[in-house]
Image (cartoon, rainbow, N blue to C red):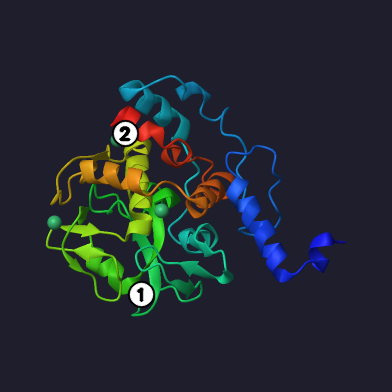
Amino acid sequence: MSRSRRSAAGGITLAVAAVVATAFPASAVPAPAGPAAVRSTPSTDAYYAPAEGKTGAALKEALHEIVDDHTRISYSQVWDALGETDEDPADPDNVILLYTGRSRAKSDHGGNLGDWNREHVWAKSHGDFGTAAGPGTDLHHLRPADVQVNSIRGNKDFDDGGSQVGGAPGNYTDGDSFEPRDAVKGDVARMILYMAVRYEGDDGFADLEPNDRVSNGSAPYHGRLSVLKQWHREDPPDAFERNRNEIIHSRYQHNRNPFIDRPEWVEAIW
Ligand SMILES: [Ca+2]
Ligand SMILES: [Ca+2]
Ligand SMILES: [Ca+2]
């Protein structure tokens, strides 16, 4: 072995980066073995076949049928799952926190200052689904977040504006909304819109839907749709986001976030 073993370290890094960059939507790149090593995405053509050519309500309904009935995990299983889905590509012992963007040890999870915890991007009070297996444990909208920043975000809707959040540069908040940093604005939008398609009120949980308001309180709505659509356009899916979609699909829930795979479907529905 191997050519890569004799290569300079920089050469290996470049080679890995090239694989990541071209991994999607290439269909023939074999996934490396080992935990959290999924860095390639097989073709999703067959997965989305029933939705092809549709728009509007028909597309949303087709996507719901594709992504529903996923394998539900328990809230305690979410810790280890996030360790895989949000692993720091530069340090397998760490995760990347959603709002601060900082790398933090996987083992530093909990409820104390300085720990990370399980952020429900679709605030769990909006529809009051709690942490039972279902929307409250759905990895497609769960991310590691700094305990203190998560508390500041609370159950606010998403919108532009406010004062910068202490200790989380690029994040802003006011009395009724939260604006995440630019690099995850689109991630947040796609997570909210996934939830709207996945949860249609036919499985014992509320029908979750986006609207263009803030201060939604405990209603099963999340805002603001017009801002989320703008964030989706400004921050398209990157390798990190595609990788977590792939891990959730292949290892945990066996369903995908369509708006990461097919960004044009946001506009086709909303
Ligand atoms: Ca506001
Ligand atoms: Ca992003
Ligand atoms: Ca819905």
Please tell me whether mark 2 sits on a helix, a strand or a loop.
Answer: loop
In this picture, is 119 found above or below 56? below
Question: Mark 2–mark 1 contact, CB under 8 Å?
Answer: no
In the picture of the structure, the residue carrying the numbered disc 2 is: 200
* Amino acid type for the residue under numbered disc 1: Gly
Q: Residue furthest bottom?
A: 113
The residue sitting at 45% across, 24% down in the picture is: 51
Q: What percent of the width, then of the height, locates residue 108?
A: 46, 76
In the picture of the structure, the residue carrying the numbered disc 1 is: 111
Say whether residue 73 is left or right of residue 230.
Answer: right
Query: If you read the primary sequence from the N terminus, does the residue marked by circle 2 or circle 1 appear first?
Result: 1
Tell me which corner region of the image, top left, top right, bottom left or bottom right, holds residue 198. Answer: top left
Query: Which quarter of the image is occupied by the N terminus?
Result: bottom right
Query: Which quarter of the image is occupied by the C terminus?
Result: top left
Q: What percent of the width, then of the height, locates residue 59?
A: 38, 24
**Foreground residue, 245 or 200?**
245
The residue sitting at 71% across, 70% down in the picture is: 9
In this picture, is 243 found above or below 229? below
* Amino acid type for the residue under numbered disc 2: Glu
The residue carrying mark 2 has its beta carbon less than 8 Å from ligand 3: yes
Q: What percent of the width, then of the height, locates residue 78?
A: 46, 59
The residue sitting at 41% across, 25% down in the picture is: 62
Mark 1 crowdedness (10 Å alpha carbons): few <14, some 14-19, many ≥20: few
